[in-house]
């Protein structure tokens, strides 16, 4: 079994094949299956919002997706697959989601090359739809938010390759299904897929691309690794799952672009050179409606899928989509900062900060180390705030974080801003016309003791003796609290 | 250009002015946000997300342009 050597990790799964349906089966107690039809237009996403408001995070399998044309789709929709950090960590064989950053960094930094299956032998190629039979509108694609112009693929993992090296690249990138065989495809301008596309276009060629949908969350996490360019997501994913990822040559592009053999659905096509159409507005991870943009398009050549395929939708801007990417970010920020600060213990990218905030924990940092680490973290594109705290602060408890900010920071001494760094221009606070952002770091750690064994030159935190605390909890154990006032 | 364009001028660096441009669809009168690069392109038509009409910015009812 992989990853049994660390106290924080266990086996990823018991099944022989790592795929979505095996995960759903293994986690059946975490799955909610509404008995009634749920509309693909706003209904499925509204269900996710309602669950989030209740702070409940089951996987949702909509077995009767009600399409815009009034028909019930034969293809179920799974959403909220990754809304729970605990469940995502479990999918990775990590017992405690709060320790994921270092483990994710270590595993994705130890790549394992994929296993290539013979063409046509993979489950994802059990059904092949080509040419005039291709019909994207037959899929239960979800229209998520008010103001979205139509149905979007939100869990489409776009895979392209660098035409110079042949190295694959994968990223989740949205596609608006506009007709049976055409959809917009928006590779964010700073993305590696965009760089690959531009390289093909510069050669006067259309860009080959495949979009694969639905897989085990561990594979989804592995293919979201934040890599350099060009580096293989197939290999990073192998490192994360501890074994080679099974891939197979795509129908249209052969071994130029592989696809995960055990995915649910694959959409293959080309991005014609310098063809743009309006795309959006679209409800983004920021929680705001991103503006309409000019996006490339994809002309679809082929759809393959498994028998009884399951369609996967990420709730954009909900924890369903934030959790997996933020956990991958934690691995990246941990790697960046750890390289300059050995005292770094942990990193947390909280969903309530969208993808803009990182909390970092240190143990007995040397002089300058915390600021070095904070500066390294801010270099990561999406971050705009990094906060450093000590080991006694629980990164995952905002009341603890605010306690540290309130009592351990003198702002002119312990905070600094750096202007002109790259960042997400989807941030609604970005000034008009800006191409870079202003970022901030806060050192909320306490000073070190003047000598080994001496107390830190700050007052100790108030507390009660452990025995008294345990006795108090025993008094309250079993006491009914209905009707007691809350904060 | 028949549409009425209102431009939000950038102020001093400490003044918040927002960063989002808006277009109003002439027939359905609904507003939707549009990125600056799309607004600047003449060859790509805007798409009203509400009535699905495609049109160039010049044929919109109103444009509020950031910057």
Image: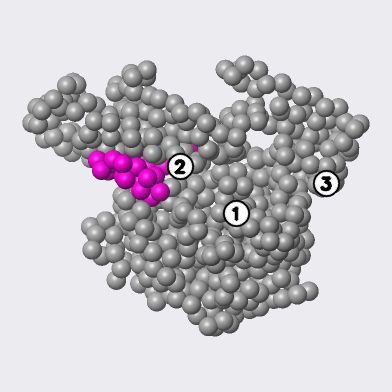
How far is mark 2 from mark 1, CA to CA? 18 Å
Residue at numbered disc 2: A380
Which chain hosts label 1? A
Residue A347 on the magenta segment: yes
At 75% from the left and 54% from the top, the residue drawn is A274
Position of A201 compared to A389: left or right?
right
Cα separation between marks 1 and 3:
23 Å
Highlighted range, magenta: A331-360
Q: Residue at x 50, y 34 (%)?
A: A421
| Distance from Cα at disc 3 to Cα at disc 2 | 35 Å
* Looking at the image, residue A381 lies above or below residue B61: below
Check disc 1 and report the residue beneath it: A195
Q: Quadrant of residue A347?
A: top left
**Mark toward the start of the polypeptide (2 vs 1):** 1
Give the percent coordinates (x, y) of residue A61: 54, 61
Q: At numbered mark 1, what does the secondary structure look like: helix, strand or loop? A: helix
Q: Quadrant of the C terminus of chain A?
A: top left
Query: In the picture shown, does residue A179 fall above or below B20?
Result: below
Determine the secondary structure under disc 3: loop
Mark 1 burial class by Cα count in 10 Å: few <14, some 14-19, many 20+: some
A359 vs B11: above or below: below
Depth order, front residue of A282/A172? A172
Which residue occupies the foreground of this view, A81 or A349?
A: A349
Secondary element type, mark 2: loop
- On residue B43, the disc is 3
Chain at numbered mark 3: B
Asked whether the beta carbons under mark 1 and mark 3 sit within 8 Å of each other, the answer is: no
């Amino acid at each position: 079994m992989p990853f049994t050597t660390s106290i924080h990790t266990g086996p990823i799964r018991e099944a022989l094949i790592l795929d979505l349906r095996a995960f759903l089966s293994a986690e059946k107690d975490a799955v909610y299956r509404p008995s009634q039809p749920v509309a693909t237009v706003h209904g499925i996403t509204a269900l996710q919002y309602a669950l989030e408001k209740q702070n409940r995070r089951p996987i949702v399998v909509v077995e009767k997706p009600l399409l815009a044309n009034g028909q019930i789709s034969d293809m179920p929709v799974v959403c909220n697959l990754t809304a729970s950090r605990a469940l995502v960590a479990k999918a990775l064989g990590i017992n405690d989601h709060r320790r994921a950053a270092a483990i994710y960094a270590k595993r994705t930094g130890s790549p394992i090359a994929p296993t290539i299956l013979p063409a046509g032998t993979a489950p994802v190629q059990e059904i092949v739809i080509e040419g005039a039979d291709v019909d994207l509108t037959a899929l239960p694609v979800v229209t998520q938010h008010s103001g979205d112009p139509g149905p979007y693929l939100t869990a489409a993992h776009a895979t392209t390759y660098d035409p110079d090296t042949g190295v694959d690249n994968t990223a989740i990138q949205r596609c608006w299904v506009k007709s049976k065989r055409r959809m917009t495809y928006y590779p964010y301008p700073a993305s590696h897929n965009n760089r690959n596309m531009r390289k093909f276009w510069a050669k006067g060629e259309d860009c080959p691309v495949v979009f694969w949908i639905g897989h085990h969350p561990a594979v989804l996490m592995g293919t979201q690794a934040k890599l350099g360019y060009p580096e293989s997501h197939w290999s990073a994913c192998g490192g994360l799952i501890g074994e080679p990822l099974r891939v197979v040559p795509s129908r249209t592009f052969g071994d130029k672009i592989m696809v995960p053999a055990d995915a649910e659905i694959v959409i293959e096509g080309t991005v014609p050179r310098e063809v743009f159409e309006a795309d959006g507005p679209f409800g983004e991870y920021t929680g705001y409606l991103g503006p309409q943009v000019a996006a490339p398009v994809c002309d679809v050549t082929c759809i393959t899928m498994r028998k009884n395929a399951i369609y996967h939708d990420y709730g954009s801007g909900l924890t369903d989509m934030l959790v997996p990417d933020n956990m991958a970010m934690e691995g990246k920020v941990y790697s960046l900062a750890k390289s300059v600060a050995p005292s770094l213990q942990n990193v947390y990218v909280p969903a309530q900060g969208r993808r803009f905030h990182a909390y970092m924990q240190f143990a007995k940092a040397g002089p300058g180390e915390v600021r070095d680490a904070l500066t390294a973290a801010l270099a990561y594109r999406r971050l705009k705030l990094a906060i450093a705290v000590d080991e006694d602060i629980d990164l995952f408890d905002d009341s603890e974080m605010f306690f540290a900010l309130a009592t351990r920071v003198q702002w002119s001494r312990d905070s600094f801003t750096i202007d002109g760094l790259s960042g997400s221009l989807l941030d609604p606070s970005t000034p008009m016309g800006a191409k870079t952002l202003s970022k901030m770091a806060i050192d909320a750690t306490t000073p070190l003791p003047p000598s080994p064994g001496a107390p830190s030159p700050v007052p100790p935190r108030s507390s009660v003796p452990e025995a008294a605390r345990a006795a108090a909890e025993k008094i309250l154990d079993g006491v009914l609290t209905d009707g007691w006032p809350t904060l | 250009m028949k549409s009425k364009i209102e431009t939000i001028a950038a102020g001093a660096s400490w003044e918040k002015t927002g960063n989002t441009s808006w277009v109003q669809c002439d027939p359905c009168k609904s507003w939707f946000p549009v990125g600056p690069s799309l607004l600047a392109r003449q060859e790509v038509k805007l798409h009203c997300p509400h009535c699905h009409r495609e049109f160039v910015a010049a044929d919109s009812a109103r444009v509020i342009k950031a910057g």
